[in-house]
Amino acid sequence: MSDHTTADPESTGDDVVARVLARAESRSSGFSLFAPGSAQALQRTETADAPGHGYDGDQFDREDRQSLRRVAGLSTELEDVTEVEYRQLRLENVVIIGVYSQGSLDDAENSLRELAALAETAGAAVLDGLLQRRPHPDPSTYFGKGKAEELRAIVASLGADTVIADTELAPSQRRALEDVVKVKVIDRTAVILDIFSQHAKSREGKAQVELAQLEYLLPRLRGWGDSMSRQAGGQVGGAGAGMGSRGPGETKIELDRRRIHTRMAKLRKQIVAMKPAREAKRANRKRNAVPSVAIVGYTNAGKSSLLNRVTSAGVLVENALFATLDATVRKSATADGRPYTLADTVGFVRALPHQLVEAFRSTFEEVAESDVVVHVVDGSHPDPAGQIATVRDVLGEAGARDIPEIVVFNKSDLVTDDDRLVLRGLEPTAVFVSARSGEGIPELLARIDEMIPRPSVEVELLVPYERGDLVTLLHEKNTVLSTDYEESGTHVRALVNPEFEERLVEFAVSR
């Protein structure tokens, strides 16, 4: 049994993909592909960027990113060489496909909607979608033979450039399906990697994305015609060119594999070489007993918006999946003046490619080394439980499962009272906030204040007057119980963190 539709936002029938996709014309009313009331991976632009939510820092990256946005109707072919600096890439027209088993229709719909949002973020226009119900994907062409023929007819009638499968395809499946539909076929992993390559900015982020791309590409190399032949030995070039062309040589695909392995080894060394700088910064925060709070969550849940609301960090906020990839650390303080750091991290998504989990392991270190995790969930999403489970799975892989967690349902201004009851049932201790309106932010900051480690080791010190810097640190980052000024120095009783205690041993007063 299968379901197919052309994605029209005006349709109200029960067709599966009619509830999954909306017509591309809906793009003119906002960034979102989906109509109001449907399961959205992206919200409408006017909702996401509405004014009146206060200053959240200068987002200088926004204009640069928008300047290269793909637009409909512009060709990639140049008519005049002077256009080369000013042209924009045309939108790629795609058809998305998926397979679901009995009883998993809702999950298939939400997953296909998310794939449509991923394709939009990567710079494509989703024209149509096709779902097939079967126990397992076809090992040859992913779809069954008849459904693959139907897909070819849809692609031809719509003039689509690409087919995107809502899973990670085996290389043989991709090739076989391309032979049937006669256009490029890619999978969910390729789309996510493409988004990451567009949005990575830092040197480390670019190296991590390139490493993930090469790991994905390696088993999918292929060649056509002469590109698969052996390189010539002797003086004559080209296969079949007579004497000297029959040396053993390397095939082109073998050469490509060797070059990829060499490049991957170089990238791994570069990423390892960047580790000491991160560790030095982290060690400096630990040495000064500064607690760290990591903001984690599903992509587009509002992590960067929340960081901007609390610290005016100026981190790029965009209504797109994986808008920010590079970890951002900003300083904040509790109500009683104790400093701590807030770190924004890369977002997660269902079926996050394992290549990215491995490549971004250095970014996940920031989470694993934190004292508190603020887990941001999109309260307006149709499947918040799925988001929570996905994020916790990745946190487990990063070794952060045992860190104290604060669950935050963001976008509470879009959540009804009935939805709040359901969300409260999922996480009874969660905090409801709105990074756009500021609702719930004081409660969240109070919860962070309660959760971050407090100084717990009592010390009694006699600090020489020439070491006034230590007395200042005691007041700023620990709890001073009493202070007396004596002839030989400052007599202080204080509660300090265990890491900071090591620096004070020589000034301890024996009791």
Image (cartoon, rainbow, N blue to C red):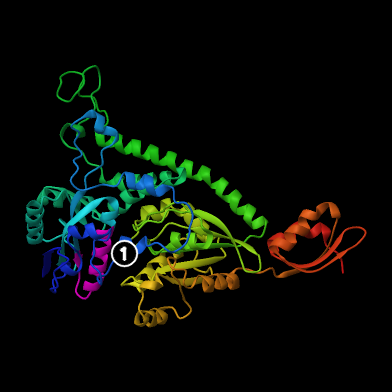
| Vertical arrangement, residue 97 with respect to residue 193, above or below | below
The quarter of the picture where the N terminus appears is: bottom left
Q: Is residue 365 left or right of residue 117?
A: right
Question: Residue 12 versus residue 293: which sits nearer the camera?
Answer: 12
Residue 253: x, y in percent?
Answer: 26, 37
Kindly identify which residue carries mark 1.
43
- Looking at the image, which residue is at 27% across and 31% down? 250
Q: The magenta stretch spans which residues?
A: 99-117
Q: Is residue 107 left or right of residue 95?
A: right
Q: Residue 110 magenta-drawn?
A: yes
Quarter location, residue 7: bottom left
Q: Is residue 460 left or right of residue 175?
A: right
As helix, strand or loop, the secondary structure at mark 1 comes to: loop
Question: Residue 26 versus residue 127: which sits nearer the camera?
Answer: 26
- How many other residues sit within 10 Å of disc 1, few (<14), some (14-19) or many (≥20)? many
Residue 465: x, y in percent?
Answer: 85, 55
- Looking at the image, which residue is at 14% across and 47% down? 183
Quarter location, residue 339: bottom right
Residue located farthest toward the front when viewing the structure as drawn = 52
Q: Residue 370 magenta-drawn?
A: no
The quarter of the picture where the C terminus appears is: bottom right
| Vertical arrangement, residue 234 with respect to residue 354, above or below | above
Residue 219: x, y in percent?
Answer: 28, 46
| Kind of residue indicated by mark 1 | Gln
